[in-house]
Amino acid sequence: MKTTILNIGFDDTDSPKAMCTTYLAYKLVHSLKQDNVKFLDYPRLIRFNPNIPWKTRGNGAVSLKIQTNNPRLVKNKVKKFIRKFSDLKNGANPGVVFYESHFIPKEFTEISKKALWSLISRRQIKNFITKNKLESFHIGNGQGLVGALGAIGYQFDDHTFELLTYRKKSQFGKKRKIVASSVKQMQEKTYPKTFNSFDTKKQKIIFAPRGPDPVFFGIRGEDTNSLLNAAKMIQTKEKPIGHLIFKSNQGTGDHLQNELDITSIKPYSSGIIEGIVSEQPKTLQGGHISFLITKNGYNLRCLIYKPTGITNEASQLIIGDKIRVGGGIRRASVKHGRVLNIEFFEVLKLEKMKILTSPSCIACNKKMKSKGRNQGYECIKCGNKAANKVLQILPRKIKNQLYIPQSSAHRHLTRPQQRIDFKNREIKFNDTSAWFTNYN
Ligand code: ATP
């Protein structure tokens, strides 16, 4: 019997009020498994440009790669699930793309890469779908097609995994009761194989959402076994319905690979840029830090928010420091121009911090006293004289290094400290591992 390899990408099924695209994936995988559909890879959870204005939370889309002898049946099921598990009444605009092939053409990958840092219009994606005669389905305005296509086209250069557990329907909206110390211990025991479950600075759980969505908690890490072990260490009385492990670009810093062009900065784009600090950092109301960088005669205002935990370091920058910054461009408003909201900064070269100060006596090594305006300086001990102030070089309180936010301020894509200079090589799909489990 003829079998077909089918890629299924979907996105924009949730709203801040309900649902989650990964929950739909869980339900769909459960159902497809019951139909004996063969999975060829882990479900892929791809995070796109975190600075697009209409995302619900983390701008995540999902794709599946399966083998089936009845693709029509599968496609109909996917559409049925999209209708059933999308929060249409609260603004979800779901989109699905189907693509029958083992290999993914480079045009898909290119558009997916662009979706990581720029804004893709609905027209662009719809044209792409028509031009390539792709089978798709959408409800609403079709915005979800961007993520749906992007999730299929995405090519991993590095990857992580996330084990997501889901709540019973009766628990939706209720407080998640998880023993915080068990999460802390899990993180300590599994380091560096898991990350961002517990914020040690703030001593709080960060691996569980607080909202009404169906996710109970999610553990992120480097391989599926570490995640399965880690999940067993979590103490809670609530019994989730099951878990699904996704392969993901979370924690890879993927959205901050491209160089922003300072001569044509586009709102909502993400990226990195090198420049020279050209205005002394100032502290704004709320403790946020604002300063300018300059490159080739163009200025860009940078903002570092207090919750990042790196504002103290940023306030130590001085005019002339060479830095590389990464982040997202905030749209200009009546009050301010375009601003780069910083997600990291790296000091590349520190300027010497010089101040003009009273000279020291060469004989006594004591600071000389001023004799009055324009009358020079004198050592009160030995009477030595000097005409002018001298330049003194002060030690700098920051170093040539990378400064990244504390984990509670991380975005899904932020590369955590433990993953700096580390990449996962492609891990083969292991269908015998418990990547999907329904606990009932
Ligand atoms: P969650 O993380 O909870 O699943 P979300 O934050 O992913 O939610 P969505 O409701 O999926 O939010 O909304 C994101 C929307 O933005 C989707 O319609 C997606 O197709 C679209 N999108 C993603 N990346 C881009 C991009 N670069 N340009 C334009 N649209 C995009």
Image (cartoon, rainbow, N blue to C red):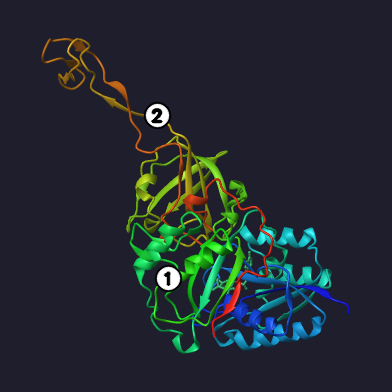
Front in this rendered view, residue 273 or 339: 273
Other-residue count near label 2 (Cα within 10 Å), few / some / many at <14 / 14–19 / ≥20: some
Quadrant holding the N terminus:
bottom right
- Give the percent coordinates (x, y) of residue 148: 68, 72
Front in this rendered view, residue 106 or 294: 106
Q: Hey, what amino acid is under mark 1?
A: Ile
The answer to whether residue 47 is visible is: no
Contact between marks 2 and 1 (CB within 8 A): the answer is no
The answer to whether residue 113 is visible is: yes
Per the image, label 1 sits on a secondary structure element best described as loop
Per the image, label 2 sits on a secondary structure element best described as loop
The residues tagged by marks 2 and 1 sit, at their Cα atoms, a distance apart of 50 Å
The reply, left or right, for residue 261 in relation to residue 173 is right
Query: Furthest residue to the right?
Result: 1
Q: Hey, what amino acid is under mark 2?
A: Lys
Residue 352, disc: 2
Residue at image coords 59%, 56% = 255
Quadrant holding the C terminus:
bottom right
Front in this rendered view, residue 242 or 294: 242
Q: Which residue is mark 1?
A: 234
Residue at image coords 61%, 53% = 424
The reply, left or right, for residue 381 in relation to residue 7 is left
The reply, left or right, for residue 123 in relation to residue 374 is right
Query: Furthest residue to the left?
Result: 381
The quadrant where residue 236 appears:
bottom left
